[in-house]
Image: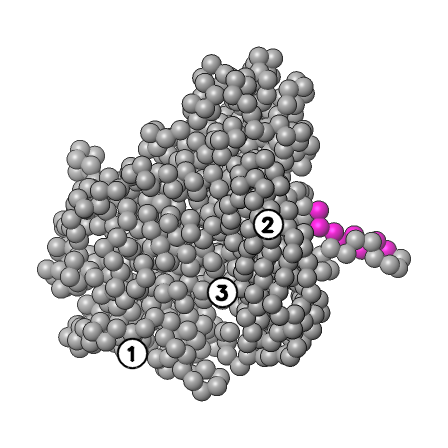
Amino acid sequence: MKNFKKLALASVLCTGVCLTAGGQKPAPAIPSDPVIEAHIQEWLKKMTLEEKIGQMCEITIDVVSDFEASKKNGFTLNPAMLDTVIGKYKVGSLLNVPLSVAQKKEKWAEAIKQIQDLSMKEIGIPCIYGVDQIHGTTYTLDGTMFPQGINMGAAFNRELTEKAAAISAYETKAGCIPWTYAPVVDLGRDPRWSRMWENYGEDCYVNAEMGKASVRGFQGSDPNHIGEYNVAACMKHYMGYGVPVSGKDRTPSSISRSDMREKHFAPFLAAIRQGALSVMVNSGVDNGVPFHANRELLTEWLKEDLNWDGMIVTDWADINNLCTRDHIAATKKEAVKIAINAGIDMSMVPYEVSFCDYLKELVQEGEVPMSRIDDAVARVLRLKYRLGLFENPYWDIKKYNKFGSEEFARIALQAAEESEVLLKNEGNILPLAKGTKILLAGPNANSMRCLNGGWSYSWQGHLADQCAGAYNTIYESLCNKYGKENIIYEPGVTYAPYKNDNWWEENQPEIEKSVAAASRADVIIACIGENSYCETPGNLTNLTMSENQRNLVKALAATGKPVILILNQGRPRIINDIVPLAKAVVNVMLPSNYGGDALANLLAGDANFSGKMPFTYPKHINALANYDYKPCENMGQMGGNYNYDSVMDVQWNFGDGLSYTTYNYSNLKIDKTSFTADDVLTVSVDVTNTGKVAGKESVLLYSKDLVASSTPDNIRLRNFEKIELNPGETKTVTMQLKGSDLAFVGYDGKWRLEKGDFKLKCGNQWTDIQCSETKVWDTPNK
């Protein structure tokens, strides 16, 4: 404990940007704006210690809410508490959704104007308000909701991800909110984890590319001057959040240094270089050290190594957790010292202004240097200047006339269509012809809550059915597509009413009713999966799909009518016993408000499937894997006197996804068969639509390192492009690949590209290339 304290204190004695190993300061991740910097220095000279510390504090909106008045008049602020928080403690940021439910944009604007008027009067510095708008305007009523991150990963469409973020920014700004806690770029590499659906899947490259696209969409092209239709992005959760050893939220991880640098850091690195203005920290603990206390990862990796002048904010109450949960601090005051010295700039407290008192005492006692305070405050002020909040703390929301528009809805529908994945289509049972008599069963068949998942109108998503009544459930969409007279709705299994986060509870099943109705149908569509949940309440102890739901499918299959499985869930649930019973399987994941309409279009053939799996779907409960596994994980029979029996046996692979048409890959070429780290390789492949309908195909480019000093991954995704092809049409897809992209992080923590043989794969095509010389980087990042 004493050694940890000494390290934490010593770590802050040197502020500013450190030099690289080669003695060169890295280029700024975001170019400095001299006008903004001059303003910041003026403020730092005249601000009191209390004012500076207040800027580093973030309080939840509940603290300044008048709950009694809100019962009569809708959300209402408490002027006395607001005056305490802003007037006395000079708090610089508020967050979260009022009354725990999404608000109209007019109500948001009214509240934020009141907050900003007081902040400008009392401090002269605007407040910055932040919300979790992670899949569209999740906390603004009547806005446009997009599929959750896992779906956007499945679409493999950068342009679509950027458009979704731009629309979310526009509609967030329509409520006078300037800051969103998105995108989520944790790697969803453990299907047990309750937040797997918030990110773009298991692969670091996909998360990096979609993270960059989101930053462009949210922030626009100039991070120093965020436009009137843009907001500041906040990358989360930095980092390694998605691989807890237990699989449960906010529990410890044990990530190797090479995996942390090469994979978990990659999306954050890419987004910072794209201009991301802020980062939120992982709530967990890795190798015994909480991320909120890890100076190496917060200050060195992010701020110094990247010369990044953005802002780091904690997650919910995570400084206090250093004391109350993690026990690396004896008191909350000591926890504040450790976190601030490690590099935290703003504390999401979120209920206690005692953070301000503790930090003031620590500065006065010399436990936190003033240089660290000034650095943190400069980063907070810089974010506010870049957002233009000093000139416009709030704005006229009437000019945001595209809010909730048909234009935005069409893009959300496209995103849902491109993200839903066809995994099985035996005998080409799909598409279903008009006039088909359909029995619709399963607990997810008639629920907006299930389509949206968590972070939808409320934290747990449990209010989606009352807030999203204007949109269509799967049942309503199929009625619209096939005619209500052709849809027999008999769920057989239903979820229990919401009570204390009981998302997993199901009512007494009525499977016999669904079975009896099958005689009147031509085909059965069984919509199974999960109810909505979010964060720790979503923890589970058994990854297998519920027994009731599996029994429903078995009973329906026993009727002899063909069964189509619709998987509507935030993470894969084990279903190996019912997959063989289904003629078709569609994984819709969490496609949000337009997901039902998208599914109806796809089932009818009015749209074509093009989604591909963004994660590996496990077949067995104790056989969890990722596509980039190590060779020893897939050995099969081993010579000698025992059976090694380590084989990949998954339900569906990363990248799997069928279509109503077929594609042929040919003529894979590369302009250089021998390369070095400094080369850029141009790869081309011909893709032909050999079927009878138009379709979109995600062309995925992989590499395989045959021999390396650290055992290489089985295969790695290196690039992708999505194209559209008419029947019989051929397109040549060209992608670039840097030689340095094929480097890996060795056991010593250094990036290295080693001389030797590689293979590239695209579709069913392979080609050989060779690195002609080894390079080891002396910088932490390539």
- Indicate the amino acid at tag 3: Phe
Numbered badge on residue 371: 1
Please give the name of the residue rendered at 27% of the width and 77% of the height, measured from the top-left corner. 370
* SS at circle 1: helix
- Residue 359 versus residue 198 in the image, above or below: below
Q: Is residue 504 left or right of residue 310?
A: right
Mark 1 surroundings: few (<14), some (14-19) or many (≥20) residues within 10 A: some
Using the image, determine if residue 774 lies above or below residue 51: below
Query: Going 71% across and 47% down the picture, which residue do you hit?
Result: 649
Residue 687's label in the rendered image is 2
- Alpha carbons under labels 1 and 2: distance apart: 58 Å
Q: CA distance from mark 3 to mark 1?
A: 27 Å
Magenta stretch contains residue 699: no
Closer-to-camera residue (308/500): 308
Q: Nearer the viewer, residue 459 or 21?
A: 21
Residue 241 appearing in the image:
no
How far across and down, in percent of the image, does residue 428 sit? Answer: 63, 30
Label whose residue precedes the other's in the sequence (3 or 1): 3
**Amino acid type indicated by mark 2:** Val
Q: How is the image coloured?
A: one colour
Please give the count of numbered marks on the rendered protein: 3
Magenta part of the chain: 642-649
- Disc 3 is placed on an element classified as loop
Residue at (68% x, 62% y) in the render: 767
Q: Which residue is mark 3?
A: 265
